[in-house]
């Protein structure tokens, strides 16, 4: 059966309830534009008969590069207002006229408020969990209540925040993601700044406070367990990915080291992660799920930092069995993906079906003046092999 993949990668923003106070943050409209282009990461999960529905009009070079690398599928832009999400546009307008996909199976990136309506309007088939269950399981409040080691404390008032933040800690928004919505409180001045910001929202909009305060751990390894929660609570284990972070921001993933796997085996980590998936199933959730975790330099295992009940770049890499990297690159002009692919090909680095190498995984994230280059490293037997040096190629394109 043909699979139709689609979905906004800013699901956390759409899960956020109304009237919930937010931590201080600077809005980055360019980053929001790049996040819209991240939906193209799902293209490598498409088979020959499958279709990926995207927010932006696909770059023709993107489909050509993927097909040459052995990945099938078509990429089609969803009709409608670009100010709306893919799900909103599908719910309002249905599938693109050229799609002809009635009866196909839907595989969304995440279940967000308009996903059920989008599936129905498009005449697609899907067994999706209820939105309330998805929103609940993705909240850091829910995963904190599992009461696993290092879980932190839920606070719902300024008095509780002051009480919980007696030492260096991290305060987290329940629906933050990839470094957004996390603030390190390491001084009275930073705590006072956060208090002022939250108090202003309470006074002006009567917003309620719901935050998670967690000890400030000194990280050693970041990693995530990847699972699928099926109907009836069945849990499928996909494995562990080591996560490459810069601070709280994602920079890629790779196979875990043998030392880390051995340590996790001794600690019963898989059983803990599967118990989290079972708890999500008990809430009514089905679908892809990852459990973000860490070890500390003090020798602690923090089994659950947060739960992501959706697809993720790391889970996509896990399914492909490749290394995945994210780097920030200058983008002089539109059409950068085609220039990058040509430069990689000329250098003998572009991955094809017959040649291992570097495969750029999205064109929509390469928007001027600065973009996010997601790429897979294919053909490496293990993560001890050196990676191709992209420096000379990227310098030529500036």
Image (cartoon, rainbow, N blue to C red):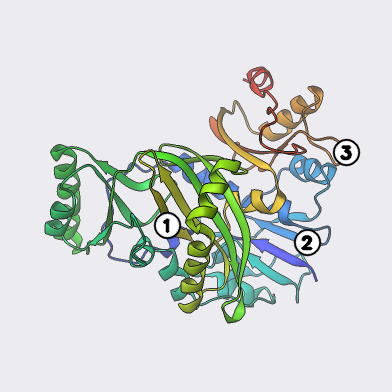
Helix, strand or loop at mark 3? loop
Residue 304 is tagged as 1
Q: Residue 7 falls in which quadrant of the image?
A: bottom right
* Residue 276: x %, y % from top left: 47, 67
Q: In 3D space, how far apart are the residues under numbered discs 3 and 2 (Cα atoms)?
A: 22 Å
Q: Is residue 16 left or right of residue 315?
A: left
Residue drawn 47% across the image and 53% down it: 292
The residue closer to the viewer here, 321 or 200, is: 321
Residue 27 is tagged as none
Q: Which residue is mark 2?
A: 50
Q: How many marks?
A: 3
* Residue 220: x %, y % from top left: 43, 38
Q: Residues within 10 Å of mark 1 (few under 14, many from 20)?
A: many
In the rendered view, would you say 190 is above or below 7? above
Whether the residues at callouts 3 and 2 have beta carbons within 8 Å, the answer is no
Q: Is residue 1 left or right of residue 239?
A: right
Residue placed farthest to the bottom in the image? 232
Asked whether residue 262 appears in the rendered view, the answer is: yes
Residue drawn 36% across the image and 61% down it: 148
Q: In 3D space, how far apart are the residues under numbered discs 1 and 2 (Cα atoms)?
A: 34 Å
Whether the residues at callouts 1 and 3 have beta carbons within 8 Å, the answer is no
Q: In 3D space, how far apart are the residues under numbered discs 1 and 3 (Cα atoms)?
A: 40 Å
In the rendered view, would you say 247 is above or below 141? above
Q: Which residue is mark 3?
A: 354
Q: Earlier in the sequence, mark 1 or mark 3?
A: 1
Helix, strand or loop at mark 1? strand
């Amino acid at each position: 059966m043909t699979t139709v993949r689609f979905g906004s990668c800013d699901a956390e923003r759409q899960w956020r309830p109304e009237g919930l106070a937010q931590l201080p943050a600077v809005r980055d409209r360019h980053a929001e534009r790049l996040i819209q282009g991240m939906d193209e990461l799902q293209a490598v999960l498409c088979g020959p008969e499958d279709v990926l529905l995207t927010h932006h009009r696909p770059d023709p070079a993107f489909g050509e590069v993927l097909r040459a690398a052995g990945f099938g599928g078509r990429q089609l832009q969803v009709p409608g207002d670009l100010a709306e999400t893919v799900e909103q546009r599908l719910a309002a307008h249905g599938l693109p006229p050229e799609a002809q996909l009635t009866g196909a199976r839907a595989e969304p990136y995440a279940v967000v408020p308009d996903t059920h309506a989008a599936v129905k309007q498009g005449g697609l088939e899907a067994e999706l969990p209820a939105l309330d269950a998805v929103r609940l399981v993705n909240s850091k409040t829910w995963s904190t209540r599992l009461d696993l080691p290092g879980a932190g404390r839920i606070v719902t008032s300024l008095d509780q925040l002051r009480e919980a933040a007696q030492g260096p800690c991290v305060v987290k928004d329940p629906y933050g993601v990839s470094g957004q919505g996390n603030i390190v409180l390491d001084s009275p001045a930073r705590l006072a700044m956060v208090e002022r910001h939250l108090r202003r929202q309470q006074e002006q909009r009567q917003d309620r406070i719901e935050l998670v305060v967690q000890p400030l751990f000194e990280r050693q390894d970041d990693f995530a367990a990847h699972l699928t929660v099926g109907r009836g609570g069945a849990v499928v284990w996909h494995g562990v990915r080591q996560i490459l972070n810069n601070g709280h921001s994602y920079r890629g993933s790779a196979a875990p080291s043998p030392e880390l796997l051995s340590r996790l085996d001794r600690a019963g980590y898989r059983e803990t992660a599967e118990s989290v998936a079972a708890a999500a199933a008990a809430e009514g959730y089905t679908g892809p799920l990852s459990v973000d975790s860490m070890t500390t330099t003090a020798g602690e295992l923090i089994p659950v930092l947060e739960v992501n009940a959706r697809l993720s770049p790391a889970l996509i890499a896990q399914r492909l069995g490749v290394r995945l990297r994210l780097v920030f690159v200058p983008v002089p002009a539109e059409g950068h993906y085609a220039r990058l692919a040509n430069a990689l090909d000329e250098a003998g680095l572009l991955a094809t079906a017959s040649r291992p190498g570097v495969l750029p995984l999205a064109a929509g994230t390469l928007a001027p003046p600065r973009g996010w280059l997601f790429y897979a490293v294919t053909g490496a037997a293990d993560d001890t092999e050196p990676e191709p040096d992209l420096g000379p190629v990227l310098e030529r394109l500036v």
